[in-house]
Image (cartoon, coloured by chain):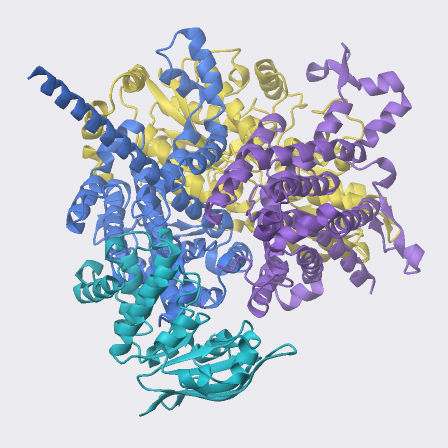
Chain colours: A blue, B yellow, C purple, D cyan
Amino acid sequence: MIVPSIRNDWVIMAIFTAVVLTAPLWLTPVGAGYPDLLQKFAIFGIFAIGFNILFGLTGYLSFGHAVFLGVGSYTAVWSFKLLTMNVLPAVIFATLLAGVFAVVIGYVSLRRSGIYFSILTLAFAQMSYNMAYSVLTPITNGETGLQLTMNDPRILDGPAGQGLPSTTLFGLDMSGYAGFYFCAVMLIIAFFISLRIFRSPFGLKLLAIKSNQTRMKYTGFNTRPYLLTAFVISGMYAGLAGSLMAITDPLAGAERMQWTASGEVVLMTILGGTGTLLGPLFGAGIIKYFENIFSAMNDGRLHEIFSFLPDWLENIVVAITGEFVGDGWHLTLGLLFMIVVIFLPGGVVEGIRRANGFLRRLVQSSGTNTATLAAEKE
Amino acid sequence: MSEDKSKISELSRRGFIKVGATAVTAASMPMFFVKDAWAAKDFRNNPGNAGSVKFGFNVPQTGAYADEGADELRAYKLAVKHINGEGDGGMLNTMKPLSLKGNGILGKKVEYVTGDTQTKSDAARASAKRMIEKDGVVMITGGSSSGVAVAVQGLCQEMGVIFMAGLTHSNDTTGKDKRRYGFRHFFNAYMSGAALGPVLQKEMGTERKAYHLTADYTWGWTQEESIKNTTEALGWQTTAAVRTPVGAGDFSQYITPVLNSGADVLILNHYGKDMINSLTQAVQFGLRDKQVNGKNFEIIVPLFSRLMAQGAGDNIKGILGTTNWHWSLQDEGSKAFVKSFGQEYGFPPSQAAQTTYVQALLYANAVESAGSFYPPEVIKQLEGFKFDGAGNGPTEYRADDHQCFKDVLVVRGNEAPSSQFDILKVEQIVPRSQVEYDAKIFGGELGPYEV
Amino acid sequence: MDAILLQILNGLDKGGAYALIALGLTLVFGTLGVVNFAHGALFMLGAFCAVTVQKILTISMKVKDESITFFDAYKEQPYLEIWFGDFGTAIIDWSVPISILLAMPIMLLIGLAMERGLIRHFYKRSHAEQILVTFGLAIVLQEIVKSFFGANPIPSPAPGIVSGSAPIGVLLGLGESVVYPWWRMIYLLFSGAVIFAVFAFLQFTTFGMVVRAGMHDRETVGLLGIDVEHRFTIVFGIAAVVAGLAGVMYAPILPPDYHMGMDFLVLSFVVVVVGGMGSLGGAVAAGFLLGILQSFASMNEVKAIIPGIDQIIIYLVAVIIILVRPRGLMGRKGVMED
Amino acid sequence: MSIVLSIKNVDKTFGGLHALGDINLDIEEGKTHAIIGPNGAGKSTLLNCCIGRLIPDSGTVEFDGKNMIGMQPHEINHAGMVRVFQTPEIFPDLSVLQNVMIPALAKRDGTFKFNAFGSLAAEKGIEADAVHILEDMGLKAHIHKHAGSMSRGDKRRLELAMGLVQHPRLLLLDEPTAGMARHDTNRTIDLLKRIKERGMTKIIIEHDMHVVFSLADRISVLAQGRIIASGTPDEIRGNPKVQEAYLGGAEL
């Protein structure tokens, strides 16, 4: 935890809720306060928090979690196509179906541990992706992605009006800020559940499995069901995230299931801090911020930002920074990964903790200084 | 412009919070749940009385098509210059009819924002949404694959922002996935097939057996279908049509069955890296030196891109294919564009650059003609718009499906290139009439003007 | 029959490539205990050694030529051709084999620098952290290559004399339609030779014996007063050289682009794991096995029965093998299981 | 006097090596039974066969009249047979207190329970149990320490605490004092004696004869996979066969 002094979970939840709901306010100055990116923060936050329940607690590194994201998205879009544009059935079906997939994949993959487990999950993910991209096109619409059409049945909704309908929550349009707030509420719930799991006997048992699985067995625990439960929970989180992606933007593409997408959530979690409550959320935020904001910088933009510098310096600075933004944003991301791992083992959360400690020492030492001064005066 | 600039510099000088708070109360509150609450004639990202408008250039900056994306971006910057009356004006001097006056659009200066599609639908849509929601663009353009084009086009329809597609060749873009707000200047697989037909007949006769290797996704399938229709109409047989995984890298296991299949033509429905690899490897397997059924074995790459073809090196020599545009064209529009692009960047533009440059100009011109940025009015200007002087002869944006019709180039890999830019030779300019088709054959529905 | 022979050749060829890449990966894992996600980038760097050599050899004199139109105002001729005539042309033609000579020292240096500068600090860190840092490094390396060479593939042809295909059908009495590219056969022999060399090195030299002992039980060997760390650094260098050579030799088959390392990364990990983490023999066996299976799964006859099987065969086989043989084909007990 | 554990005709071979041959052993309720023997005699193999880590080639291991062969380790644990490991098998990443709470939870929750929404902080009973045992072990000062960072001796005691907190019917101790300093050994002996007074049945494998003779009610001697003698400490002390096998004739 970032603030170890706060022991009361309800206080944590209250702060968390306040921070998430005011995100449009405090993210605007850094250029991230627009609906789509806010939605992405929340959605990938859920994805990473869920992934952390598996990886952070049990140590089982899945390289195939994007499958559940994809399954969630496809299920949600099919729910929009066949049933109704209301988002609730989509969320429920997507989460459940992702859970079913997680039971199957998890049951098989958890027969092995370590990197063998990782490769099993990766293999399932790659198979799903390759099939979704080509052979399963009738279900997934292949490369183009599954989308709404005018002649979808939508049996629970009345006849469609002009143009494609949009996703709604009982009439409330789910695009823009409304969509973000829906995702935000889901994020808060997801975070709450994760918090409870972390603080529960179940969570402690998962941690113990990570620490020494053999011993767990001789201590009287059947570890397989524990692992499978954690796997399914995190799969359902991914399914939920996938459904939210479809809700805020009703199109589901196969590339969501590619290994790079699975790898992305791994990177998010490690970058932020594996096994910490908030770390995955930070990781998700940082990677999505880079992807959306750094990639959109161009020289013109940089010149605006550095216009306060003298011209010659401005040109040099723009030339140098230009290598790291726009088409160079991958370079920055790669460097960031390296810097964080090298200097901050434990991820961003570790960095915050250190900064926190440093500040505290600073405050304390200045406090003592004042005290000494005061004493001398007397 | 000035408003934006002051905001940014203020940000970097002072704290974030103050500006942020005002920006949010100003920007986000009124947008709450009010998508349907636009007043008549008001619309998303209406520039109103602002002195400038923004275009969104959504191109691949990372991934396999990054070089094409970079070339698209160069063309866009040039187009913005020309629209704003800077530089030598390029096609503004040749395009007819033209309402643009070289003073921006409706007197407003054109600015732009850029984004990275990563050649992924999700990333492309996220980038497009940022442009629409955060940067307030009036139009989005770019892209280098059909999947992305269809995905972004669908989004733009929902959001009510016009999308001028970049490089996309699938029949679906203006077929079953066409949208009222999406426009494609680039040609498509059907037109490739139609243009190749007569040339193939002349070069290879009517007694041929074709073997298809097809990238296993929607674009590959539509191209395979279109080319098959054309060749079978010529009397060719199709020996086999084999689907290959995208990004297979090594295609040897798909090429060896060609050797003794009895086929005498290999058609590669691949693009980008797949095309480079499969062509390189097919040539290594000696297919070009082969004699089958008493005829020389031939390889055809129906969709050629000069930029990508460079990667195949000498292997493209003598290979037939089609392309949307080539810098060696001698019409006035092409010459003017090649000249200004060359002066700006020192090398000739690619077909991706030409199509995106023209798309930007076409949009700007349509707004100027409509006298308004109101999308339905702009769309009505673009629909059925006939123009000339933008390369490929007299051109029409067909109203029925938003597909541009113009001459198609049949090209051949140059046997003796004089430079690295001279690797394709225009074999024949196939007139537009020969590649036209009934818009109904691909189905789809454009959707409403008002969203 | 012909078809099967050719598919076996294809499979061996692919297998050779897979095995070469996987060999270094599993070697590094077995000795250093490091999961190296930057291994694909080493393969890519090797391929770009070939590109670089070719670019250097073809540095050209630009002669102004007024007769040519706009963009071709310069006629280019490589200095080598100007200086040495036909011999210069021949050198350019042979640029890929020549670049092997350059690739070996360069890849060794890159490997040593990587190990000394970065990897060694991660021996004791978790696999997850190793993955993150090496993945970051891989991205940085490929972005650097991209900024020099662009994103498009760059053609790197084999020497003219071996760029065509060999009439093996005629040689074997199977008819003229059975041909196979010379370069692919060279690649197959080359990968065999490299694999053999690595095995021989580890089997028959004292250095190799220490390394093998270290792979088995690092602490004990360390206690004997042998400087294992230093040797492991060299092992990393060797792994880099092997990956680099695989890249150089693959350049004529697959024109190199900056992203090719990532394309091979997942596959090479699957090969390593199917073979058994840290098992050299396993990596080679799994490489050839998966290569051949992939080739057969791509045959039209097979695809007619199970559509799309060629897209998933590798992963399907990986799943089955890992489930049936818990430690892969030849993995040791207890390695990487927790 | 009832028999808690009955090992009948147990055989185990590894490759060509006959690790255990025809072992028969009965453990009585409430007694401390020591198994001694030279290195490689098969002591640990026998223990592993009892708790399900190894499966014997033939023979039965009956606990409370039920055959344990083929049962999963966690099932054997819940049957009431708990092993304390020779090399500390603790949870190094958890705190000392959590290390002891885990087996206590096992005792209460069974092999699997999905209590993901209960709060750990509310598990006062479990915590009190764990603290109590730790106090007994003299580890109270360490309860919030990282278990992995403790000294080896402390880890052994923690290991013991983890076994004891489950209050098993039969505790299997694999060399509980190996590698301990004399001082620590004596403390552990005292501790085990106190447990004995509570009537817990124990099997102890031990090298240290001082430990064996101060704790055991009965002793079985294993050599080359066979039981060569069984009896009270006094009987064993005087058995020449044992002296021969064990120390090559030296006085015990």
| D147, C157: nearer the viewer | D147
Instruction: Name the quarter where the N terminus of chain B is drawn.
Output: top left
For the point 42% across and 36% down, the residue is A340
| A28, D212: nearer the viewer | D212
Percent coordinates x, y for residue A259 in the rendering: 50, 50
Would you identify the image quadrant in which residue D90 lies?
bottom left
In the displayed structure, A249 sits above or below C255; it is: below
In the displayed structure image, the side of residue A334 where residue A197 appears, left or right: left
In the displayed structure image, the side of residue B303 where residue A114 appears, left or right: left
Would you identify the image quadrant in which residue A301 lies?
top left
Tell me if residue B24 can be seen: yes
In the displayed structure, B216 sits above or below C74; it is: below
Percent coordinates x, y for residue C35 in the rendering: 55, 48
Percent coordinates x, y for residue C297 in the rendering: 67, 62
| A291, D58: nearer the viewer | D58
Total numbered badges shown on the rendered structure: 0
Tell me if residue A78 can be seen: no
For the point 59% across and 53% down, the residue is C220
Percent coordinates x, y for residue A34 in the rendering: 29, 35
In the displayed structure, A245 sits above or below D47; it is: above
| B45, A377: nearer the viewer | A377
Instruction: Name the quarter where the C terminus of chain B is drawn.
Output: top left
In the displayed structure image, the side of residue D82 where residue A13 appears, left or right: left
In the displayed structure image, the side of residue D194 where residue B245 appears, left or right: right
